[in-house]
């Protein structure tokens, strides 16, 4: 009897799941139909719209990834240590040795340190090892169909179709992350449109190859205002009498920037800081908002304009710290 009840129970659950999946699939198909009209009206050729969208599928897993909130966050020091470790440096040096002439040329041309380019590639994809295997047309379609950030992803998908239509990117290689990022440096379609370049001039932009991907990343950093040979961040020891308004813990907007010398009375190791004291800086304390019972005053960092450029790339205080730390680790080796 109990077994029978259990199997009936599972049958009910199963039919509910199937109905649900069916409902969202048919809704998705309606969405695709409407999206195709929108894409054609936005200037993408009907041929490309039909070709790419006829293979687009709804991927429920992507919605799960999008909603996933880890219950436990690593503290900043652990996060940075893991991503800027010796293995990363070793692997990056291997790539640099192989591609030295191309990377050196790009560094000179775009005025962006090779160490920074290597650090970004190392952290984004472990030097091309984790490029993602999702069909990004389906990734972007799923996230556009979903309500949470529909407008943003719809725009990204239309840009991607335009890039294919204009034969700037090759539709055969559009595999990337679940969120639609692509290539060695995980560019979203809008970033490709605005900053990617066909550096080796073979008519397509190949963001999984060294020449085009390094030049595109360097061009992006140069255009958003990265300043070569100026600092990104420096670790500090805070005096506890610092007013809390100076402690930034959100990457959305870095506030209360002052010259380094203004913060003198709040920094215990001020006299040992090897940095121009007239530079504009802000203070960040990245653990406060994400680690339960974190110390209010440490770890703390002075961050400069270059640091904010990395936030443009990816709006995370810890991501930018990891990138600049790995960059410094390369600096000691190259
Ligand atoms: Ca190319």
Image (tube, helix red, strand yellow):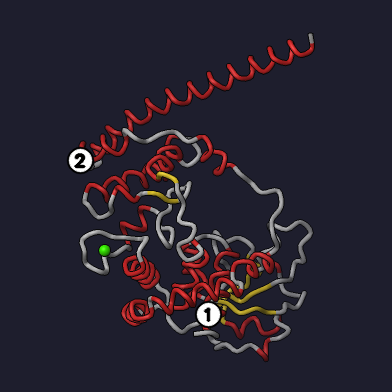
Left of 35 or right of it: where is 320? right
Look at mark 2 in the image and give the residue it sits on.
45
| Spot occupied by residue 48 in the image (x, y as percentages of width and height) | 24, 40
90, 232: nearer the viewer: 90
Mark 1: few, some, or many residues within 10 Å (few <14, many ≥20)?
many
Q: Is residue 2 above or below residue 159?
A: above
Mark 2: few, some, or many residues within 10 Å (few <14, many ≥20)?
some
How far apart, in angstroms, are the residues tagged by discs 2 and 1?
Answer: 45 Å
Q: Is residue 80 above or below residue 36?
A: below
Which residue: 32% across, 62% down? 196
Residue 244: quadrant of the picture? bottom right
Q: Quadrant of the N terminus?
A: top right
| Spot occupied by residue 198 in the image (x, y as percentages of width and height) | 26, 64
Residue 256 appears in view: no
| Spot occupied by residue 165 in the image (x, y as percentages of width and height) | 23, 47
31, 125: nearer the viewer: 125
Left of 184 or right of it: where is 200? left
Q: Nearer the viewer, mark 2 or mark 1?
A: 1
Q: Total number of numbered labels?
A: 2
Q: Residue furthest bottom?
A: 271
Which residue: 21% across, 51% down? 166
Q: Quadrant of ligand 1?
A: bottom left
Left of 138 or right of it: where is 266? right
Label 2 with label 1: CB-CB less than 8 Å: no
Look at mark 1 in the image and give the residue it sits on.
330
| Spot occupied by residue 224 in the image (x, y as percentages of width and height) | 39, 69
Query: Between disc 2 and disc 1, whose residue precedes?
Result: 2
296, 320: nearer the viewer: 320
Q: Secondary structure at mark 2?
A: loop
């Amino acid at each position: 009897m109990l077994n029978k009840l259990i199997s009936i129970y599972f049958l009910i659950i199963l039919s509910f799941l199937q109905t649900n999946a069916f409902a969202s699939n048919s809704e998705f198909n309606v969405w695709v139909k409407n999206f195709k009209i929108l894409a054609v009206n936005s200037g993408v050729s009907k041929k490309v719209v039909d070709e790419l969208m006829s293979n687009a599928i709804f991927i429920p897993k992507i919605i799960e990834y999008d909603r996933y909130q880890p219950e436990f966050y690593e503290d900043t020091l652990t996060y940075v240590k893991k991503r800027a470790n010796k293995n990363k440096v070793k692997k990056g040096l291997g790539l640099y040795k192989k591609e030295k002439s191309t990377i050196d040329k790009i560094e000179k041309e775009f005025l962006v340190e090779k160490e920074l380019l290597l650090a970004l590639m190392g952290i984004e994809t472990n030097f091309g090892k984790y490029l993602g295997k999702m069909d990004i047309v389906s990734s972007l379609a799923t996230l556009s169909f979903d309500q949470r950030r529909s407008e943003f992803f719809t725009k990204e998908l239309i840009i991607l179709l335009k890039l294919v239509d204009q034969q700037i990117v090759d539709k055969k290689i559009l595999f990337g992350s679940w969120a639609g990022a692509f290539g060695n440096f995980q560019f979203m379609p809008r970033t490709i449109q605005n900053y990617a370049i066909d550096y080796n001039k073979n008519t397509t932009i190949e963001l999984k190859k060294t020449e085009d991907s390094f030049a595109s990343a360097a061009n992006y950093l140069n255009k958003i205002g990265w300043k070569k040979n100026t600092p990104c961040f420096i670790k500090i020891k805070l005096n506890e009498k610092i007013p809390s308004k100076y402690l930034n813990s959100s990457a959305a907007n870095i506030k209360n920037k002052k010259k380094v010398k203004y913060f003198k009375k709040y920094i215990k190791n001020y006299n040992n800081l090897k940095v121009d004291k007239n530079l504009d800086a802000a203070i960040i304390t990245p653990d406060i908002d994400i680690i339960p019972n974190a110390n209010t005053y440490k770890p703390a960092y002075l961050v400069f304009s270059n640091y904010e450029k990395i936030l443009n790339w990816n709006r995370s205080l810890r991501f930018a710290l990891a990138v600049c730390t790995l960059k410094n680790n390369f600096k000691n080796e190259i």
